[in-house]
Structure formats: C-alpha cells, structure tokens
C-alpha cells in the first residue's frame, strides 16, 4: 500500500458498537490522499492522552480500528499504574513503515495531532523512529521522545527495556525465589526494546534465545551478544523459564497457549493476551503472567521524564522501581484471591484512573 494514494478507508459512524470500544472519549479519523490515520483518546481523567504512534500495513480498516481502540485503552491503564498524570491515547497510520514513510506523510500526521490541541501527545511506537517524530514535531508541539539532549536521542525503548528487565527479575523472584543468573529466557522480537533487553539479560548472566521475523536483525543480535536463536514458529514453545514477548500483540492465544514451556510470561509487547480469559488459563497452567501494561510502562515514564527535563539516570532507575512494587502487589493479590494477574491489575488500574487522582506522582 502506498500511503499517498487513496485506499479503501471507511470508519463507520457506529464506532461505539465496535467490540473493542470501551467508552473512548474521542476517536478522530484523518483520510485523504496522503494520510490514513486514526487517533483514539480513551480517557483523560488523569491528564492528556499520551501514547505512541504506530505505523503498520493493516490488512483492513477494521483491524486498524481494533488495534487503536485496544492500545489506547491499554495506555490509560498503563499511565495510571505508573503513577503518571497522563490519560490514555494511541494513534495508528495505515502504511508500511518499510516502504511508505515520507516527510509528507509524517508532517501530515503532525498536523493531525496538532488539530487535537494537546488532548493527545504522541511518541514512538512500532514502525516509528526518533527521526519520524522529529518530522511530526515540525508541525505540532504535542509529540515527545525526540530530544537531542537525551542520551538515546529521545527514544524511550532502552528505558522500556530496563523496566521490563526489572519486571522479569521480580517475576523470577516470585516464582523461583532466585536471581536471573542461569535462567533461560526466550525473547520474541529483537527490535528497539528486544535488543536492549537481550543486553541486560546477558549482563545478568541469563541464557538467552531469540527469534525475529527479520533475519538480519537476528544475525546482528547473535553476533553482538553471542545468544542462541530459533525460528519465529519455535520461540513460543521453546524450553525456557521465561518467555518475553517483545514483538507485536497476541503472542498468547488459544493456539500458542497449549505449547508454552515457560512458567513465566513477561515482556514488552502490548496486548500480549489475545483475550482476557487467557490470563486465567495461564494461571491454571501454573504460568505467572506479568501484565503487559504494568511491566512495559518504562517508555511512557521516559516520555514524561523527557517532558519534565528529568535526565539523571539514577533518578530514572529509582522511579522505575514502581514496576517491581506494582508487580509484587499484583502477584500477591493474585495468590491471595486466586484470580488471574491481568484481572487483578485491571481492577487496580481502574480504581486509579476512575478516581481522577494521580496516585504516585513520578516527578
Ligand atoms: P520494533 O518494531 O522495534 O520491534 C519489533 C520486532 O518484532 C521487529 O524486529 C519485528 O521484526 C519483530 N517481529 C514482528 N513479528 C514477529 C514475530 N511473529 N516473531 C518474532 N518477531 C517478530 O518494536 P519495539 O519498539 O521494540 O516494541 C516491541 C513491542 O513492545 C511492541 O509491541 C510495542 O508496542 C511494545 N512497547 C514498546 C515500547 C517502546 O518504548 N518502544 C514501550 C512499550 C511497549
């Protein structure tokens, strides 16, 4: 699909009857010859709706809508759990990031974001880079994650990876009462977050196996970190202690759950469970699930810190400790009440954002 040619793009006026619609405050659509994009604002009780801009060649408008509705909802829950004064939002551009990106597309997206006048703040997501955000920033003030003053040029992925690493450590401590040394970890997807996670896991002396749909990426990670690799088909059922989904959503679904060998699922990807019921099935199988938006909130925390000018890495590490605290509380409550961790997390997050009070100001 070429992003600057007209595609079949229709968003039904009855979006509120979409199965993934969950009292979203606003769903804005841009559709012209240059840009087909959707911005979904789920909830702004705690502050402006913040969340990444994903560029993906969705097979249908329906798939793009489902993604943006689910992802924006997840951002509300994520920011609430991270104690940030942010609501939840997300945007998707229907295009292939490998072939369709152009300054025209990205500045048009900047205009679209600006048109919401700060109700939505965008940053990187799958398919967008720091350079893309910089182009959007030519047209809008409401983007973050591209500051030249930041160590990684503003890319939040390394901080996301650090938070995920803390979360994996917490899950291993809870499940096995030990450190990561010698534990086998499978990383599905070694993109911006996955590669940084592999580095941290290796430093902690874990045994790592990786897979990625991009063969060149796998070769680079194997060369750089001397880790094992396998096919994308095998990575979910490989015999490991921890499975870290760091690709796209839906890694845990009705087909993959039967062959999981890990007894911990803890990774960066959003919407790892294809449906909420799978959380209870994981629990029945004795698999500890670290709810995705609880463990992967390092990126949105980093976006917030960049906006606040917080750069001290010791301070950032200290703030990321909220991930261990939250997971520990969720795991304990799950044990106590015999309810799945994703259900316990949802309940905690809802209490926080529905109260309208920021519970743990991260600055
Ligand atoms: P990315 O696009 O840089 O990396 C994703 C990688 O997954 C790519 O290398 C891709 O080739 C690979 N992949 C795709 N399908 C695959 C499959 N079936 N099997 C194996 N590999 C596959 O994205 P990212 O920024 O690293 O983010 C990874 C995940 O974490 C996404 O779900 C994203 O939404 C989530 N996340 C990212 C951040 C962040 O700061 N970047 C923050 C929170 C959550």
Image (cartoon, grey):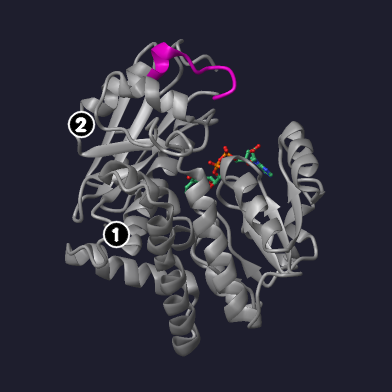
The residue pinned by badge 2 equals 116
What's drawn in magenta, residue-wise?
A: 97-106
| Cα separation between marks 1 and 2 | 25 Å
Q: Residues within 10 Å of mark 2 (few under 14, many from 20)?
A: some
Frontmost residue, 202 versus 27: 202
Q: In the rendered image, which quarter contains the C terminus?
A: bottom left
Task: Please name the residue shown 28% across and 56% down the image.
Answer: 84
Other residues around mark 1 within 10 Å, as few (<14) / some (14–19) / many (≥20)? some
Q: Quadrant of residue 50?
A: top left
Q: Is residue 273 visible?
A: no
Q: Nearer the viewer, residue 293 or 148?
A: 148
Residue 28 in the image, given as x and y percentages of width and height: 27, 32
Q: Which residue is mark 1?
A: 362
Residue 159: x %, y % from top left: 48, 50
Residue 103 lies in the magenta-colored region: yes
Where residue 101 sits: x, y (%)?
Answer: 50, 18
Main secondary structure found in the magenta portion:
loop
Residue drawn 18% across and 67% down? 355
Residue found at x 47% / y 16%: 3
Instruction: Examine the rendered structure and indicate whether residue 357 appears above or below residue 224.
Output: below
Disc with the residue nearer the chain's start (1 vs 2): 2
Report helix, strand or loop for mark 2: loop
């Amino acid at each position: 699909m070429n992003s600057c040619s007209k595609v079949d793009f229709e968003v039904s006026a009855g979006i509120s009857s979409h199965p993934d619609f969950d009292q979203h405050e606003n769903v804005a659509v841009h559709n012209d010859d240059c840009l087909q994009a959707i911005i979904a604002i789920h909830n702004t009780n705690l502050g402006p709706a913040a969340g990444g801009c994903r560029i993906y060649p969705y097979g249908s408008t329906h798939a793009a809508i489902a993604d943006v509705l689910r992802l924006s909802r997840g951002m509300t829950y994520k920011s609430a759990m991270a104690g940030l004064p942010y609501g939840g939002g997300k945007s998707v551009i229907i295009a292939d990031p490998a072939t369709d990106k152009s300054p025209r597309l990205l500045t048009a997206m900047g205009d679209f974001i600006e048109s919401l006048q700060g109700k939505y703040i965008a940053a990187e997501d799958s398919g967008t880079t720091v350079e893309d955000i910089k182009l959007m920033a030519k047209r809008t003030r409401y983007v973050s994650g591209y500051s030249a003053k930041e160590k990684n040029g503003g890319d939040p992925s390394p901080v996301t990876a650090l938070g995920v690493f803390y979360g994996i450590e917490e899950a291993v401590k809870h499940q096995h009462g030990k450190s990561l040394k010698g534990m086998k970890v499978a990383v599905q997807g070694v993109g911006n977050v996955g590669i940084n996670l592999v580095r941290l896991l290796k430093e902690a002396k874990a045994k790592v196996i990786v897979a990625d749909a991009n063969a060149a990426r796998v070769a680079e990670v194997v060369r750089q970190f001397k880790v094992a690799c396998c096919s994308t088909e095998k990575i979910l059922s490989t015999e490991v202690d921890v499975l870290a989904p760091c690709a796209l959503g839906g890694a845990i679904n009705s087909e993959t759950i039967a062959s999981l060998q890990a007894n911990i699922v803890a990774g960066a990807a959003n919407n790892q469970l294809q449906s909420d019921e799978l959380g209870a099935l994981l629990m029945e199988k004795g698999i500890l699930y670290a709810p995705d938006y609880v463990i992967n909130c390092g990126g949105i925390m980093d976006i917030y810190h960049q906006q606040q000018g917080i750069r001290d890495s010791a301070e950032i590490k200290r703030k990321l400790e909220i991930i261990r605290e939250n997971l520990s509380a969720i795991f304990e409550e799950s044990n106590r009440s015999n309810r799945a961790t994703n259900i316990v997390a949802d309940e905690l997050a809802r209490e926080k954002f529905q109260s309208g009070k920021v519970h743990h100001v991260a600055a």
